[in-house]
Amino acid sequence: MNLAQVVDSFLTSEFAGGITAHRRLPAQEAVYAPFPEGTDPRLVSVLRDRGIQALYSHQAEALAHVQAGRNVVVVTPTASGKTLCYNVPVLDAILKQPESRALYLFPTKALSQDQIAELHGLVEALDVDIKTYTYDGDTPGNIRRVVRSAGHIVVTNPDMLHAGILPHHSKWVKLFENLRYVVVDELHTYRGVFGSHLGNLLRRLKRICRHYGSDPRFICCSATIANPQELAGRLLEEEVEMVDRSGAPSGTRDVVFYNPPVINRQLGIRRSALLEARRIAERFLVPNDVQTIIFGRSRLSVEVLLTYMKEATARCKRPEWGVQGYRGGYLPNERRAIERGIREGRIRTVVSTNALELGIDIGGLEASVLVGYPGTIASSWQQMGRAGRRQGQSLSLFIASSDPLDQYIVAHPDYFFERSPESGLVNPDNLLVMMDHLKCAAFELPFRDGESFGTVAVGEMLEYLAEERVLHHASDRWYWMSDAFPAETVGLRAAARENFVIIDVTEPQPRVLGEVDRFSAPMLIHEEAIYLHGSGQYQVEKLDYESKKAYVRHVEVDYYTDASLAVNLAVLDEFERSVEGGATRSHGEVNVTVLATMFKKIKFDTHENIGSGPIHLPEESTHTTSYWLTLRPEATRDMTKDALQSGLLGLANALGIVATVALMCDRRDLRTAVEVSSPHTDAPTIFLYEAYPGGVGFSQKLYRMHETLLQEAIRLIANCDCEQGCPSCVGPLLQVGTGAKAATRRVLDVLSRP
């Protein structure tokens, strides 16, 4: 069967009862435009030799902005040729002025390697001396010296720019004196804390460029998000032109949402998404030789699915090497070979983590299967877009797990298809993040009196650092005086440095397994906790609180642990307030104090409580921002205290789910707390507060979308098939209590009253 017949067969099979949505997206014809006048004829000739007789309209529009000296952000679908939007102006500039330099920033090393291969191909075809190099942790020392002195195009990542280039800018004089363009690819990945760090990193970059007399233009590329121009402008602190009308062709795409059948209605547990993916692939994709990419949510799920796919392929008497896995941990040469095999069509099925979500060229697959929701609408479209990269028909299938986010999306397909993708939110002015980069900037170049950092006046911050004996003020300058190398102590993926390191002592040679932020440590890595990492289970044997180290050992048990927390919130400042129906909504600054008191052992699948134990750790306190809802006390007087608490907990869980969907954030970025009688409001209150000290802007966004949150929470609970409540709507019954679904509906009724 061809792909169209495979899709029709699936839609009418025994799986049809679980299909919650089917959308057929029509094909789109290409819209072309000529190369802009003045483009170097050698470059035009090479592109035409490669079959590019004209540009897509969005490529030509982007080039026009760049040639006019403007910053630009290009926001078009996967495989729409965004790479040419920066390669053409960069190569054109170097051909005309050989001293010109460019800096390419990619979020991952793998993406850097992929892009450098395409760039090398263009340079070789041009037959001119344009040196392009990758500069990352894998670059040998002898090559690094060449890159610093002679590299026309330096391809790197934010982490290397932060710790390996900017602090040593005096070795990169040629680059910074002649820096013409900075490319920031996959802009949508720079959100939350990572994006806030990038904003400060770009402040440092531009400061060093000014020191050397250059003023580069920025070319940004992004997957489709709700606010690309706003995000780019916030990161660059400059005006940015947006190009978002794609001229690239696309084939017909069938998008199907499938929800596995319920096997335990009371607990809301469904048949395994992994097993359903196996059944569907065995029945429809493998026998019909449909070239497919399957995305798993973790390394473990990828390895399990890979085993299933190899078995299915063997049963169909097809070669086993036609099925490959792809994830972090594979050696670079191994990954390159897999990518090449997919492009050439020899590999028929690839099972991957989100490592293949970004713009690595893997050719034109026919089907993409998402086993679990990637976390955002933008990431979902990115993964779906890995199939159908050429003009033929393609299938994108989303198989939901029992996870609350999965269940929300699969039960509300209109939300996915009709709403714009999420916003990317950043806050470069977060005090903790900015202070770290201010130290790095002072190490790189002394600050002058009155000098700002980006758009922020930092005189008081410099005085504070001088009091702490980190800086020294002499004449009109602030000089670095500490022996420390500040960039080494600043990670770009977290707001605070005080992370707990998790050390696996299962083998004779201990290894670092991961890290947990200080605020989460009491909940996740207390002694006797089961720490989940890559779907593996590790028991915490010892927590050295002073040294910030947790020692864990791999175990195989049928339970996980859940810490009980005493959370106290003190409202420090209320930024905005508004009365809405039966409640008051607010957002502002809060102090969150968390004390882990005890933990429960929860059995997988049944969620039974099979044991408990005390936690002996000091309380943790942090300042952050929060959005909160306060109910009128008189409106809840007819509810018992237990019912009110269950209803508040249930609504907090539902709001947490829909807020995570609405914002471009991880579930761990937001936390919830309820108070039957808040000391601040003297009334029942639900708090959604940001996990990171200082916050990154989520709270204000939630305050603005209050009505949407409530309506989506109502829909979520009303459409859930469970009887008394489940993790997909109001939360596990062992946390919220039986009858929580009815109690949550009563609280929502109160909020809906005029």
Image (spheres, rainbow, N blue to C red):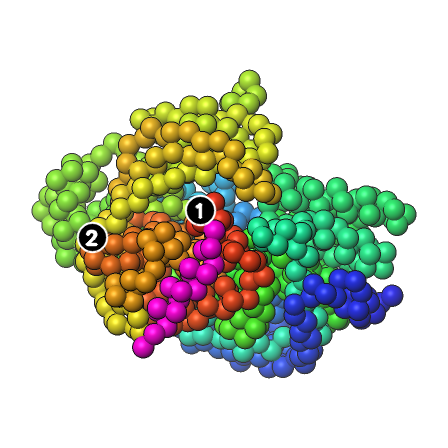
What x and y, as percent, mark residue 394? Answer: 73, 67
Q: Which quarter of the rendered picture does the C terminus lie within?
A: bottom left
Q: Position of residue 639 (x, y in %)?
A: 34, 60
Q: Residue at x 35, y 41 (%)?
A: 565
Segment tinted magenta in the rendering: 738-754
Q: Is residue 487 visible?
A: no
Q: Residues within 10 Å of mark 2 (few under 14, many from 20)?
A: some
Q: Residue furthest left?
A: 475
Q: Residue sitting at 37 percent across and 30 percent down? A: 615
Image spot of residue 323 (x, y percent)? 77, 47
From the image, give the main secondary structure of the stretch colored magenta. Answer: helix
- Which residue carries the number 2 mark? 679
Spatial CA span between label 2 and label 1: 23 Å
Residue 746, relative to residue 696: is it above or below? below
Q: Name which quarter of the figure residue 82 lies in.
A: bottom right
Q: Is residue 402 left or right of residue 473?
A: right
